[in-house]
Image (cartoon, rainbow, N blue to C red):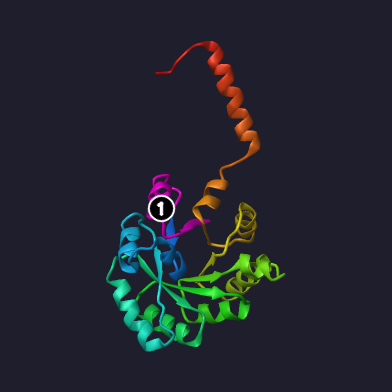
Amino acid sequence: MKFFADTADVAEIADLAATGLLDGVTTNPSLIAKSGRNFLEVVKEICGLVEGPVSAEVVAPDHATMMKEAAVLRALAPNICIKLPLTIDGLKTCKALTAEGVKTNVTLCFSANQALLAAKAGATYISPFVGRLDDIGHDGMELIQDIRTIYDNYDFQTEILVASVRSPVHVLAAARIGADVATMPPAVIRQLANHALTDKGLAAFEADWAKTGQSIL
């Protein structure tokens, strides 16, 4: 499974990229707004920090303007992935950009039917929002399973990018199902490494080592 950081915090991205565990980045208008910086400047800086795809979202509601905005975003860096809303205009734009060889990420997916449409439009990634479905009493992972089944049935190449990830539990469940990517806040990526028994074991090792009075350096 590939890990994407869902953030516009360049310091966080740089720190995670240094681990070698980061495969890409996803952003959205809300995350950019939190940074308080210029949208295009932030996206371009992020593209320079990671080799993998960086999803940058268009904000126009209509196909014609989406295409114009996509052209501006594509010019920022070669690893830009155009993020599009799951609307008819968004799908139309997805089809057009895919035909030009541009990577696309169709976002705000909440049903298997929507995911089917995105795959038919040639999306590189589909972003189902599991956390937001959980928030309204649905099981977000059921959607991931449905999409996995449908995509496998028809050999669609669109990758399932699990979004709105709230905890390591979501990551584990998505990995079991066979999702291709999980995008998550930096804090959740770090939580994946945490375990109480690991901490306990390290504390014991450190205490025993201190008793020896030795030093490796």
Looking at the image, which residue is at 29% across and 65% down?
77
User: In the figure, residue 75 lies in which quadrant?
Assistant: bottom left
Membership of 3 in magenta stretch: yes
Q: Give the range drawn in magenta.
A: 1-22
Image side of residue 147 versus residue 1, left or right: right
SS type, badge 1? helix
Looking at the image, which residue is at 64% across and 61% down?
177
Image side of residue 88 versus residue 69, left or right: right
The mark total stands at 1
| On screen, residue 76 above or below 94 | above
Q: Farthest residue to the left: give it.
A: 75
Quadrant (top left/top right/bottom left/bottom right) for the C terminus: top left
Where is residue 153 drawn, in percent x and y? Answer: 61, 74
Image side of residue 123 versus residue 128, left or right: left
User: In the figure, residue 165 lies in which quadrant?
Assistant: bottom right
Where is residue 69 drawn, in percent x and y? Answer: 34, 79
| On screen, residue 87 above or below 190 | below
Front position in the image: 60 or 163: 60
Where is residue 198 drawn, in percent x and y? Answer: 61, 34
Looking at the image, which residue is at 58% across and 19% down?
207
The amino acid marked with disc number 1 is Ile
Front position in the image: 196 or 144: 196
Membership of 177 in magenta stretch: no
Disc 1 packing (10 Å; few <14; some 14–19; many ≥20):
many
List the residue tagged with mark 1: 13
Where is residue 108 drawn, in percent x and y? Answer: 54, 74
Q: Farthest residue to the front: give it.
A: 36
Looking at the image, which residue is at 44% across and 52% down?
22
